[in-house]
Image: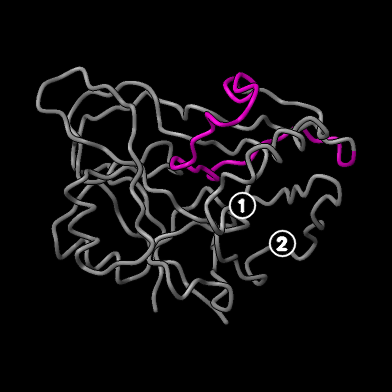
Amino acid sequence: MRYFIIEEDKSLGYTGFVNAAPKWGLPGVICPGCKATWSATGTDYPSVDLTPVAALADFEKARAEPLEEYERLRELVRPLLPPGAVVEPGSSFGPLVGSAQGRFGQFVSYYSQVLLVRREALEKLQAEGLRGLKGCRTEVRFRQRNSPELLELELLPVGRLHPKCLPPNLEPPCPRCGREGLSLPKEPVLDAATLPPDLDLFRLLDMSSLVICTERFAEACQRLGLDGIVFLPLPTEG
């Protein structure tokens, strides 16, 4: 099986612009162990409704909090997460809220780590039997007539980069907050032994800003003429 990184196709001249943010989110963290102030990108769960949580205002403003406060808030949302979800500082929940305008393709890569898709395109892919495609509603208002219905794809983090493409002197994760401090290698390689056998679209555990797909997904998009994204080959090694 071959794998690809999904990125925005900037060659088609689409003018679409989205200005939106998730409705809720966990704060970033101030770690007393490694002394870092940080938050992750890509661990977004648009299907998760936080309205049952008390003190909902604690999840409405982006900020950094001491580690103990982050951990308290994390435990409040953990029971609401879908199976397989990984929660980190900065994880977001609920629909994208905001506005959009312009011409869009069938896919929209928003800030690289968020992948939006037109409803009709998602239904075509699901009819092809592709696995792990979960579209979630958005609250994005369009400033135009005949606007598309854009859904956000909820992508679980699974799989890892192969150790061969990582720095040999990479420091272990912080034992207190779990921060890895890993940046994207110039030539990333997937660890084949860690890749999911039942998903055609997903993220990585150690590089959640990347959106990864199988060749089954890429071939289906090309066969169906679904545009807006490009597929960059990503090697694997067992």
Camera-side residue of 221 and 155 = 155
Query: Is residue 160 within the magenta segment?
Result: no
Looking at the rendering, the stretch of residues picked out in magenta corresponds to: 33-61
Residue 96, horizontal then vertical, whole percent: 40, 30
Q: Main secondary structure of the magenta part?
A: loop
Q: Quadrant of the C terminus?
A: bottom right
What amino acid is labelled 1 in the image?
Val
Q: Is residue 108 left or right of residue 106?
A: right
Residue 202, horizontal then vertical, whole percent: 45, 59
In this view, the residue farthest toward the right is 33
In this view, the residue farthest toward the bottom is 238
Q: Are marks 2 and 1 in contact (CB under 8 Å)?
A: no
Q: In the picture shown, does residue 230 fall above or below 91?
A: below
Q: Quadrant of the N terminus?
A: bottom left
Q: Please name the residue shown 18% across and 53% down the image.
A: 226
Mark 2 is surrounded, within 10 Å at the Cα level, by few (under 14), some (14 to 19) or many (20 or more) other residues, namely few
Residue 228, horizontal then vertical, whole percent: 24, 46
Look at the image and name its color scheme: one colour
**Residue 30: numbered disc:** none
Image quadrant in which you'd find residue 137: top left
Task: Label 1, secondary structure: give it.
Answer: loop
Q: What count of labels does the image hold?
A: 2
Q: In the picture shown, does residue 229 fall above or below 67?
A: below
**Residue 167: numbered disc:** 2
Q: Please name the residue shown 54% across and 36% down the image.
A: 92
Q: Please name the residue shown 51% across and 42% down the image.
A: 44
Task: Label 2, secondary structure: give it.
Answer: loop
Q: Nearer the viewer, mark 2 or mark 1?
A: 1
Query: Is residue 46 within the magenta segment?
Result: yes
What amino acid is labelled 2 in the image?
Pro
**Mark 1 highlights which residue?**
86
